[in-house]
Amino acid sequence: MTCFDNVKKNFGFGCLRLPMRDGEVDTAAFSRMVDAFLDAGFNYFDTARSYLDGKSETALKTCLTSRHPRERYILTDKLTHGFFQTEADIRPLFESQLEACGVDYFDFYLMHAQNTQYFREFKACRAYETAFALKEEGKIRHVGISFHDRAEVLEQILNEYPQIEVVQIQFNYADYEDAAVESRKCYEVCVRRGKPVFVMEPVKGGVLANLPAEGKAILDALDSGSPASYAIRFAASFPGIRMVLSGMSNMEQLTDNLSFMRDFQPLNEAEMEAIGKVRDVFRSLNLIGCTACRYCVAGCPQNILIPELFGAMNAKRAYNDWNSGWYYTVHTQDNGKASDCVQCGNCEQTCPQHLPIRSLLKQVAETFEKKEDEQETD
């Protein structure tokens, strides 16, 4: 029996960006999405304790696991840095995750967001050994990792722990040859070692669903799908990629994704050529490669909403967005401004994209925090 015998199709529901209302998960909306997803023949759900401050796990209990029989879905959770300090902390955390999700076991359990630093800390706490022991006890079916670092670091982890069964990587057409993310190189490591690949961020946090005008025109000319459809199908078109996750926050996104993943067709030659042209458009814009995972926000002593400020900056660059400055003001009214950064570096230590956040915040400040008399002359 392989780890994919019960996985239906190659498309999964990522539960980081769920429908929200007044700061809480909209469980009525999420329940409808869960039902539609299952009824369409899909069954893979992915969560983590860090998603939505723990609300993702409990929302799955409310909307999925308490409403559907266990054999109807596949559930993945993760061991996340910051939620344990010692080896002794891991089992109680794991048990609390089972309880929060309302299950007796996880189909997949991933060592979360592995990079050089986190891998060192996970090793010191014997996190991998604990996960393998939990597998032997039947509380985990399969152990894997989610990964954000260079390909050589992935090689090191797989060398030290060949028992790893799956590897989840960031993989999309914008990051395919990116020097920081190394999507292609990480994918090739997995293929060479025979490790099935799970894909996160196929739409790059929504960036590839909301293209600049020039890029959108290229895909519109194909007249065969939404921008998000090409991004997700790009990721799913590669051999060895067994699961592509999408974080869906409304029924419209879910319906669109199901329309082309229900009977999945890889990108054809013309579509691949168009994707290459869109990639060139992005390269010309010098956008900040933030996926809005929000890992940087929790540790910021100045309470700077870094993803929102980067989003305003990208809107300014990509669309010459006339109201990006207004949104910058909205996001800094009750939170820190870009210029409030104290250069502590906490954000850069947790950034999966390895962004130079401190220097980028300086650029954001220079763009949006001009004096009033300077702004009036623009």
Image (tube, rainbow, N blue to C red):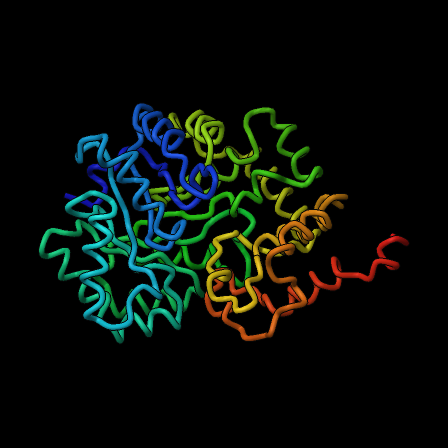
Q: How many marks?
A: 0
Is 196 placed left or right of 200 in the picture? left
Q: Quadrant of residue 365?
A: bottom right
Image: 177 above or below 61: below
Is 108 placed left or right of 330 in the picture? left
Which of these two is toward me, 104 or 299?
Answer: 299
Find residue 28 and report its horizontal and vertical position in percent.
37, 29
Residue under the image location 41 percent in, 68 percent down: 152
Is 348 placed left or right of 263 in the picture? right
Is 241 placed left or right of 72 in the picture? right
Find residue 100 and report its horizontal and vertical position in percent.
25, 47
Q: Quadrant of residue 185?
A: bottom left
Image: 370 above or below 105: below
Q: Quadrant of residue 29?
A: top left
Residue under the image location 61 percent in, 39 percent down: 210
Find residue 219 and report its horizontal and vertical position in percent.
62, 33
Specify whether residue 370 is in view.
yes
Image: 96 above or below 230: below
Image quadrant where one finds the N terminus: top left
Which of these two is toward me, 192 or 169?
Answer: 169
Residue under the image location 17 percent in, 49 percent down: 141
Find residue 357 and report its horizontal and vertical position in percent.
59, 66
Q: Residue furthest right?
A: 377
Q: Residue furthest left?
A: 137
Specify whether residue 237 is in view.
no
Image: 208 above or below 119: above
